[in-house]
Image (spheres, rainbow, N blue to C red):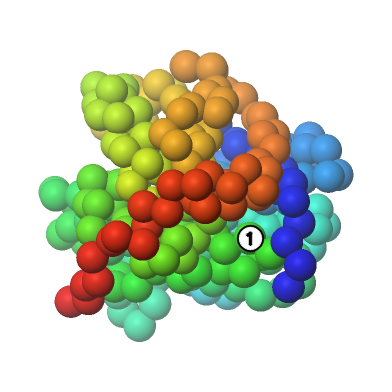
Amino acid sequence: MDIQEELRIALLQMDLAWEDRSANLRHADELVASLPPSTDLIVLPEMFSTGFSARAEALADTMDGETLQWIRRWAKDRQAAVTGSFIVREGGRYYNRGFAVLPDGREYYYDKRHLFFGGEKAMFTPGCTRPVIEFRGWKISLAICYDLRFPVFMRGHHCEYDLMILPVEWPRSRQEMLDILVRARAIENQSYYCLVNRIGTDGMDLVYQGGSQVVKYNGKVMERLTDFQEEVRVITLQHYPLESYREKAPIWQDGDAFQLL
């Protein structure tokens, strides 16, 4: 597949209504409608339809439910890939499920592997594998929030992805850690990293600063959204500088081979 040199990514740094799927879907619909038609990829926060809640039994949707119907419509109508995560019930279990729904009808899913201690770990089932998605010539992978703390899991063999998408709900009290970790993972993997966080206060009185950003393959912050402000911004990534950087500094060739269990 030919590589589309420029990939235009929309970061939707939203304020989420606590445990209110209908309100969040309507609000996301308004934000998606505001995007320019040239947008290639739309990135929503973690658990964008409910906020980060462990009340899975009450809040989970199914794979043929309302949430995915909206996501599929956005992908089709906007001719863009749509990514993020939401709470899913499947086979009697609950998952924090990342998604990448493409405009040609292809769908990819990733169940969060590293579940945060407390409610999430008690209620949800972890996943085990990350997809690598071919989209307009770019290799894209998915991870979710707490995964960012685990470099072995995030490691790509032979630069297997060009872009990592990270929907998160990361509280203000740990924002500095988030900023450091995302830069470190980008440097280690010589890949673009796109991180989208929420803003506002949730039902557990946790405050979210935002700090949504795109980090380049060399660890430099390309663009960062405004703290404590709902914002939608489209950022253009270029593929050739990434290829050139990897050729000049082929650090990935010295990476260790390993298998995740």
Element carrying mark 1: strand
Residue drawn 33% across the image and 47% down it: 188
Q: Position of residue 216 (x, y in %)?
A: 50, 37
Identify residue for label 1: 138
User: In this image, 129 relative to 164: left or right?
Assistant: left
User: In this image, 67 relative to 29: left or right?
Assistant: left
Farthest residue to the front: give it: 248
Screen quadrant of the N terminus: bottom right
Residue drawn 78% across the image and 38% down it: 35
Which picture quadrant has residue 236? top right
Which picture quadrant has residue 52? top left
Q: Position of residue 71 (x, y in %)?
A: 65, 59
Farthest residue to the bottom: give it: 91
Out of 146 and 135, give the one closest to the viewer: 135
Residue drawn 54% across the image and 17% down it: 226
User: In this image, 3 relative to 169: left or right?
Assistant: right
Q: Amino acid at mark 1?
A: Trp
Q: Position of residue 98 (x, y in %)?
A: 45, 60
Residue 99 visible in the shown view: yes
Q: Position of residue 22 (x, y in %)?
A: 58, 48
Which picture quadrant has residue 10? top right
Screen quadrant of the C terminus: bottom left
User: In this image, 211 relative to 9: left or right?
Assistant: left
Residue 20, relative to residue 79: is it above or below?
Answer: above
Residue drawn 83% across the image and 45% down it: 38
Residue 66 visible in the shown view: no
Out of 222 and 17, give the one closest to the viewer: 222
